[in-house]
Image: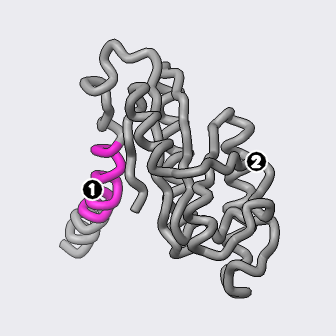
């Protein structure tokens, strides 16, 4: 009897641990992507919490990978504004010392984005509000006069707007 109970418990544990993974594998976006060959997306990145910011950048990267895997050609613009601006600078003076490891990871993500031909735009208004000299941004970024105007312009060109907090 003890062996039967152990077998039932083992099967139960396998079912609850494997079940969610098996169900997730069947999820797809085929309805949304039916007939789509190219996507144009503007990501509005303005979160100032380092771990959350890094997570948002990873989500952008995952989205790119999944679109490519679905046979879609993505065109991405990543707009940086608000307190997120502090993590896209050459100097480390704009963030806390404890946030420097995450800042380095963000810089690596920027390199990856550029390798994938993403446009990365930094709002100069946000730079001013954060007291960041525009010459201090990473060279991979294009500083624009007004991030809101970029959002308006890209949406007018058919880019989907994705807020990233």
| Residue in the foreground of this view, choosing between 108 and 95 | 95
At which x and y percent is residue 41? 45, 35
Q: Secondary structure at mark 2?
A: loop
- Eyeballing the image, is 50 above or below 17? below
Mark 1 vs mark 2, foreground winner is: 2
Q: Quadrant of the N terminus?
A: bottom left
Q: Which residues are magenta?
A: 11-24
Tell me: 144 left or right of 164.
right
- Which secondary structure is most common in the magenta stretch? helix
Task: Describe the element under mark 1 as helix, strand or loop.
Answer: helix
Which residue is the site of mark 2? 140
Residue 154, image x, y percentages:
46, 34
Above or below 45: residue 112: above
Mark sitting earlier along the chain (1/2) = 1
Question: Where is 164 relative to 87, above or below?
Answer: above
Are dots 1 and 2 in contact, CB under 8 Å? no
Which image quadrant is residue 99 in? bottom right
Would residue 162 be counted in the magenta stretch?
no
**Circle 2 crowding by C-alpha within 10 Å: few under 14, some 14–19, many from 20:** some
- The residue depicted at 55 percent of the width and 46 percent of the height is 78
- 100 left or right of 48 in image: right
Closer to the camera in the image, 9 or 116: 116
Tell whether position 20 is magenta.
Answer: yes
- Residue at the image position 51 percent from the left and 47 percent from the top: 60
Label 1 to label 2, Cα distance in Å? Answer: 47 Å
Occupied quadrant, residue 116: top right
What residue sits right under mark 1 in the picture?
Answer: 15
Q: Residue at point 27% right, 56% down?
A: 15
* Quadrant of the image containing the C terminus: bottom left
């Amino acid at each position: 009897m003890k062996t039967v109970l152990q077998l039932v418990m083992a099967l139960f544990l396998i079912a609850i641990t494997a079940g969610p993974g098996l169900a997730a594998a069947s999820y797809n976006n085929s309805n949304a992507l039916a007939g789509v060959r190219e996507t144009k997306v503007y990501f509005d990145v303005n979160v100032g919490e380092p771990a959350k910011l890094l997570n948002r950048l990873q989500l952008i990267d995952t989205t790119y990978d999944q679109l490519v895997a679905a046979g879609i050609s993505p065109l991405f613009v990543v707009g940086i504004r608000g307190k997120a601006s502090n993590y896209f600078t050459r100097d480390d003076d704009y963030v806390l010392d404890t946030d420097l490891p995450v800042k380095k990871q963000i810089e690596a993500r920027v390199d990856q984005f550029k390798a994938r031909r993403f446009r990365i735009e930094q709002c100069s208004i946000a730079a001013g509000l954060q007291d960041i000299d525009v010459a201090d941004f990473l060279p991979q970024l294009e500083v624009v006069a007004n991030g809101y105007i970029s959002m308006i312009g890209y949406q007018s060109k058919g880019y989907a707007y994705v807020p990233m907090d």
